[in-house]
Image (cartoon, rainbow, N blue to C red):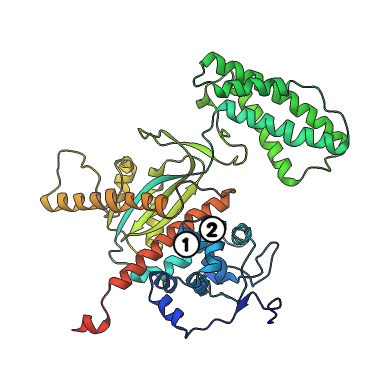
Amino acid sequence: MKDTTQLPLFKDFDGYSPKYHFFKNSLLGQVHDSLPWDGLASLLPGEDTGPGAPKWFDAKGMFALMFLKAYLNVSDRQLIERFNTDYSLQMFCGRLLAEDKQIRDTTIMTRIRKHIEGHCEWEQIQSVLLDCWKRDVNNTHVLLMDATCYESYIRFPTDVKLLWESCHWVFEKQLYRLCRILGTKRPRSKYVEQKRKQLAYFRKRKNTYKETKKRRESLVYLLEKGLKQLQEVLDVSRAECMGPEDFSCLRTVKKVLVQQVFLLDHQPKELKDRIVSLHKPYVRPIKRGKENKPVEFGMKVHMLQVDGLSFLDAMSFKNFNETTRLKLSVLKHKTVFGQTSQLGADRIYASNANRRYCTGNKIFTCFPKKGPKKHSRAEQMLSGEIARQRATVMEGVFGTHKDHYGLRKIKVKGEKREKLMVLFATMAANAVKIAKRKQERPPPADRAA
């Protein structure tokens, strides 16, 4: 009987097999050929370096898995399951699994994201990709820009939910656990009584303002008492039973208490940097002004587009005014694609400062005309075409990213990791678009004829 226990995880890559030929002629193979693997691999150190670096994939394999996750729009576990059974994904990463072998580590994608965020910034990755793709772009003088919000995967936040999650973490996940480890008696509190009242509050379909305010005041008092009791236990145990993540969450809970005490007597608009999630404290409410969704909770992104190729200008979890990014966006476009002569943007960008800047740099825009002088017939047609491209192609990209590249709700935790998810989803969509253009392009013999 053949012994397979000593077989390596991966086998040598055969570039002449029929499967490799089928892969190279597929859309996934064309996407693979459109990516600058050597440039991306140079951003990371050698294999098996750094804490938590995956030992089975080199730099190319790590970037390939990140692109595949966005391309397939699957979870980390589903990606590894498909990698174990799909030879095309293995060829995309340049690592073919050996016979009777499979990857059982479902946390490998978490360690890959940690490894990438620790060695390079998202601007560096985007710069390498744009330098490779800019030769395949036409109409580089036309620049489109718009802003959107990619939401984080959190429950809809309310003050009562946030306070109760904080109380639950302080009492059940920390205080009671530490008392059980130390063998001491639990301190007296009203937690069990407040838990019954909280369940009764949640079961009601509608709660009045008076009931909600009373619930908030009770939870603020309970949380303040729980933090004092937890601090006393930590002083006795010298905080030996808590890790770095626990202390980070404890700081967040203390900040939540300070903010909620402030909100009892003040309006929400008076509070800055309001925390809306206990486990994602970096997320902020982003006011968008939409009819069906006036406030979104996630990352605001200012995106630019040239000939259908999208690239990121700014990403922030704090709300910012995208109209102030117009000058910087034009300069960023100039460094990559050259001079801008036509610009398409929403009406919110049509401030006097932006109009003067565009006029001074001879940039034609789709902004409504000010003053008695009107556009000529040709200028009206050009302005209408730029506005149409911005409203269809530019805004359509946002829906494509959310529906097909995993940005409907970003589930990873961490500020840098969420930015990496947005970056790889945007770049994966660009790679697919470039690959489809190359497939539609006729061969050299047909073009000569």
What amino acid is found at the position of numbered circle 2 in the picture?
Gln
Q: Nearer the viewer, residue 12 or 288?
A: 12
Quarter assignment of residue 333: bottom left
Residue that mark 2 sits on: 78
Quarter assignment of residue 191: top right
19 left or right of 390 in image: right
Marking on residue 353: none
Instruction: Bin the neighbour count of mark 1 within 10 Å (Cα to Cα): few under 14, some 14-19, many 20 and up.
Output: some
Residue at the far front: name it. 1
248 left or right of 80 in image: right
Please state the horizontal and vertical placement of residue 183, each as a whole percent of the image. 88, 35
**Residue drawn 70% across the image and 42% down it:** 248
Q: Nearer the viewer, mark 2 or mark 1?
A: 2
| N-terminal-most mark, 2 or 1 | 2
Marking on residue 126: 1
In the rendered image, the vertical position of residue 123 relative to residue 185, given as above or below: below
What amino acid is found at the position of numbered circle 1 in the picture?
Gln
Quarter assignment of residue 255: top right
Please state the horizontal and vertical placement of residue 199, each as a whole percent of the image. 61, 24
